[in-house]
Image: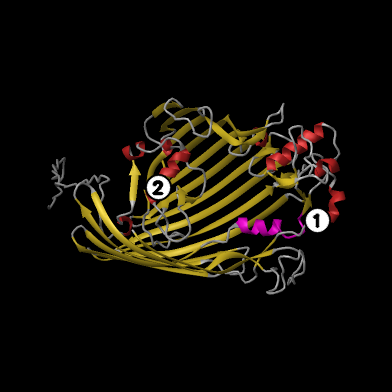
Amino acid sequence: MKVVIRPGVQTLNLQLKVASVTQQVTVEDRAVTVTPEPANNASATVLGGDDLQALSDNPDDLIAELLAIAGPSGGPGGASVFIDGFTGGQVPSKESIREIRINQNPFSSEYDRIGTGRIEILTKPGTNQFHGSEGFNFSNDFWNSRNPYAQQKAPFLLKEYIGNLSGPMAKRASFFFDLRRDAVDNGAIINGTTLDPVTLDVVNPFTDVFRIPQRRFSINPRTDYQLSANNTLSLRYSFTHIDIPFSGIGSFNLISRGLRTTTIAHTIQATDTAVFAENMVNEMRFQFSRSHNETTPNTVGPALQVLGAFNGGASPAGRSFDTQNNYEFQDYMTVVHGTHSWRFGARLRRQSDDNISPQNFAGTFTFGGGTAPMLDANNRPVLDSSGQPLLAPITSIERYRRTVFFQKLGFSSSQIADLGGGATQFSIVAGDPGLSASQFDLGSFLGDDWKLRRTLTLSLGLRYERQTNIRDQNDFAPRIGIAWAARPKTVVRAGFGIFYDRFALANTMIALRRNGIRQQQYVITNPDFYPSIPPISSLAAFQSAQIREQISPTLVTPTYYQSAISLERQLPLNTTVAITYANSHGLHMLRSRNVNAPLLGTYDPAVPGSGVFPFGPVGAVFLIESLGLYNQNSLR
């Protein structure tokens, strides 16, 4: 349009024509679909919204149901659980869960384990309007049947209190907060053989039902803050407290064996999500989690074990403490360019464990069966024609009965032993119960999902891992997957990858604790001091050969070569069918071997102490080494 400027006031009328714009909004439901995308394999499941309502409210029951849905993982390892992208941690309450993804992209290089059996839990963000809900669950033993091994029905009482609230905090911030308290009373059934405390008669069977209360409290606040139009910061805190004042009771374990166990867990998570362009997203995450477990026996003193009858006395676990601190940092980048979807990044983790475990530091008396003089109804020895006591087999509970009975009469230890009483063994451990250890591990990856055609997708990836506490450091793991839509609603998939199993910190702690120096074990056969405990200094002559654990200096990280091929078909009525063949071949599997076993041909079972030992008569020396093999074929 041409505009001419003239002197004086002029009016210019411009009319703008509004262009017609067509906007298409696609709302997808959670219908089961089979496509060549890596995350749309037939075994992949996404649970959210109403799907979550079908699952249990209790976190322990919830994770058990998710493990059942995920199915078995490829190889010997179990399922892996991720909370908001982080490994491990406490499972949040169902009210704070936004979505659960199961078995997504099995051969992705982003993960150190194969995707079958992988569970990813994503929590809810805040909302721009206030929302809240509360709930209460109640259950008792009205519909329960009586256990056939108990004279009375075991009690059961469950009370669950649930509440959550979400809403805006400021113009750019929102929050979500949920609180949960569980009160569960379960009945522990004791079934064994004991003595009547008054008459000292053998009570067989002895049954009892003991009520065990369990209390759990948890809170899970989360806040999301929009730092800019393209940058969002999410902060989440989780606190869980579990208290069980009488755990360990049931089966052969009497009430005196009970101990109080408490667990306190803290988790702090921070996630920064930045969108640099329409096709680039960066996720930076940090997590710190701390769990503290404490065990306190309700009875002080030695443990009592009457084989095949009952376990009494105090718990042999002693007062123990375990504190674990875990740090995890991730930085992942996603870039979409044409037919390529790139994802790369790194993860660094540190784990530390401070442990105090005085296992059997108070000692254990063991009563077993054997041969002893026969006793008449008045507990007097039955003599033969020559005046010698007649011998007969006795049970462990009978040996214990004679010990208690004759002690009450004031008999000496030697007299009790002559009458078939007395403990058959006493064992005790001394030394340093404390132990601390830590380790780092690093994992970096690069992956590309390349859509060659609408019906063909190729996934390529490479992962690199290393860790401390072992000499093997450089672990490269290539991954490849291909999916082809041979026909509409029919997909053929194949994949191959190398996966490594981290050498657990628990193995390092076992080797440190059983190095033969930190702790000593003493074993006395047929002790004459029951129920007293002698000082450790007087047991030097009874120090037994230690069971030692060592880590092989040539240890190699366990390696799995895993492959799978599947045929998937989408059927009517929201149903799919898949037939999958999977193979797992493992090298360098961990095993523990006694390298101080007697040399071949030098040990005579009839001669105690015989044999030539490579390291001398110092007891078993178990070497943790990586010489095992693993093979698995499965058709699902």
Does residue 318 appear in this view? Answer: no
**Residue 433, visible in the rendered structure:** yes
> Mark 2 to mark 1: distance in Å?
48 Å
Q: Count up the numbered dots.
A: 2
Report x, y in % for residue 348: 54, 58
Quarter occupied by the C terminus: bottom left
Q: Is residue 73 left or right of residue 318?
A: left
Q: Relative to residue 71, is residue 64 depicted above or below?
A: above
Instruction: Name which residue lies at 73% across and 39% down.
Output: 400
List the residue tagged with mark 2: 68
User: Nearest the camera: 40 or 283?
Assistant: 40
The answer to whether residue 513 is magenta is: yes
Upstream in sequence: badge 2 or badge 1:
2
Amino acid identity at mark 1: Gln
Above or below 426: residue 279:
below
Q: Position of residue 151 (x, y in %)?
A: 53, 28
Type of amino acid under label 2: Ala
SS for tag 1? Answer: loop
| Mark 2 burial class by Cα count in 10 Å: few <14, some 14-19, many 20+ | few
Over which residues does the magenta segment extend?
A: 505-520
Quadrant for residue 381, please give it.
Answer: top right
Query: Which x, y percent locates residue 323?
Result: 64, 46
Mark 1 burial class by Cα count in 10 Å: few <14, some 14-19, many 20+:
some
Tell me the SS state at disc 2.
Answer: helix
Q: Which residue is mark 1?
A: 543
Residue 192 against residue 575 in the figure, above or below: above
